[in-house]
Every structure is written in C-alpha cells, then in structure tokens.
Amino acid sequence: MIKLESAHIEEVRGIRKLDLDFHKEKCAISGPNGSGKSGVIDAIEFGLTGHIGRLTGRGTKGLSVSEHGPHVDKTKFPDAAFVELKMFLTEIGKSVTITRKVKDPNKPKIEPADEDVKAVLAEIADHPEITLSRREILRFILVEPTKRSEEIQTILKLDEIGETRSALNAAQNKLQAAQ
Amino acid sequence: MATLQKIIADKFLAKLAESKDVDAESIERLRSLLAGGKKLKAEDLVKIFSTPAGGQIK
C-alpha cells in the first residue's frame, strides 16, 4: 500500500501550479465544477503510472498524454508539465519521491532509487486500475445489463483482454465455417 | 511485475496447455502474439489454429 504525503503539480491538465499535503491520510477533494478536482486525480495517476486513464479507452480516440496531458498554455512545452509525489511505501517502510515529466512519462526520477523501491513503483505503474473516475462509475451504473461485463472490463482497464476474446471468438467462427 | 491483463492471459495459456486439443507449438505462437502488444486480429489466430496443409485432423 502507498500513503501519499504530498504532491507538487505543475502545468498538468487544468492545473498551473499546486501543492497539496495529504499527511498519509485518506482525503477527499471538493470544489465547484471546473475547479480542477479531476485534474488532481489525473496528475496523481500520471505521477504514479505515467498514464492518464481519462485519456484512454472508449471515446478518447486522438487523445494522448503528450498532447493533452500538459496545461493548454503549455502544450508546446511538455517539459514544463510534471508531477512530484512524495509517498510512504508501507510494504517496505520507506519514504519515496517520484518526479515524472509529461515529456518523458516512462522515465521517472525516483529517490531513493533502491531496487526494492523501484520494484514497488513498477508494480503500481503496471496497475492502471488503481484510479476510478466518476465518469467510469456513472457509465457502469447507467449501462444496460447485457453490456455490464464490458464496463467492468473497462473499469479494470482490461479492454485488451476483451479485444483478445472477440478476436478468439471471430477466429473460432471462421475455423468452424471452414470445416 | 505482471499487469492484470498479463495475469489473465497467462492463466488462459496455462489452461490451454492442459487441454489435449491444442499442441504446444500453437500455444507458444499464441503466447508470442499476445506478448507482441499489437492489436490481435482474427486472421492471425486462424493461421495459428488452422490445420497445416497435409496435416491430419484430430
């Protein structure tokens, strides 16, 4: 488990510059529409994984972290967009700082760069299902029952498995038709 | 560390290996295809699972 201590967000999504202290506690973010609540979630997800779930999946064709991750005023300067997260990794009992730039999402700066720290962070980065957006929850509630399993796959970021299953079904049909 | 998708794919391949209907070579080809990261096409799967020319239908 990870416990966030603080976040420093610069030029990511709708956020110009923001410092947040979480004190390793559970927290809720509230504010009026358009104030940047989702931007904070996006930035934390980006800091942890290098991805922004809201920019992937159904209905997001043409969106990318490199183009749509930075603030609109900084799209030509992705170097300026970055997230620095300070967190406590309970599994190994260490405090860690990870800094990730939109320009180089797969090469975060990790301090301390110990092997056990890198292993825990790699596991987190491999699990994009850690964040669940309001949009995903609403879609799951509103979807017709026959498509609920597809929505669960989307929520768990298992779209690729769904595509693989469809391809296997299509191949099975083709092979049966050929017999 | 494995992603959820990889865990599911590995279990699927292991289950397939237990089946006597699919040969080891086909499973390995499927494993490589899944690991390739490209979008899977039905045609590629048909190539793997179709009986080779002159082969016997089991």
Image (tube, coloured by chain):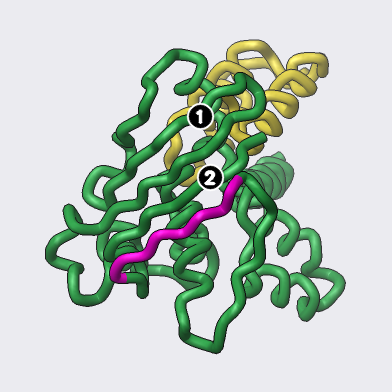
Chain colours: A green, B yellow
- What amino acid type is highlighted by mark number 2? Glu
Which residue is located at x 65 percent, y 72 percent?
A: A134
* Quarter of the figure that contains the N terminus of chain A: top right
In the picture, the disc for residue A5 is: 2
Marks 1 and 2 in Cβ contact (< 8 Å): yes
Q: Position of residue B42 (x, y in %)?
A: 56, 45
In the picture, the disc for residue A95 is: 1
Q: Residue furthest bottom?
A: A33
In the picture, the disc for residue B14 is: none
Q: Position of residue B55 (x, y in %)?
A: 62, 16
Q: Residues within 10 Å of mark 1 (few under 14, many from 20)?
A: some
Mark toward the start of the polypeptide (1 vs 2)? 2
Callout 1: chain: A
Q: Is residue A51 above or below residue A133?
A: above
Q: Are discs 1 and 2 located on one and the same chain? A: yes
Callout 2: chain: A
Classify residue A62 by image quadrant.
Answer: bottom left
Could you tell me if residue A174 is visible in this image?
no
Q: Position of residue A137 (x, y in %)?
A: 72, 70
Query: Residue A69 vs residue A130: left or right?
Result: left
Q: Nearer the viewer, residue A175 or A142?
A: A142
Question: Which secondary structure is most common in the magenta stretch?
Answer: strand
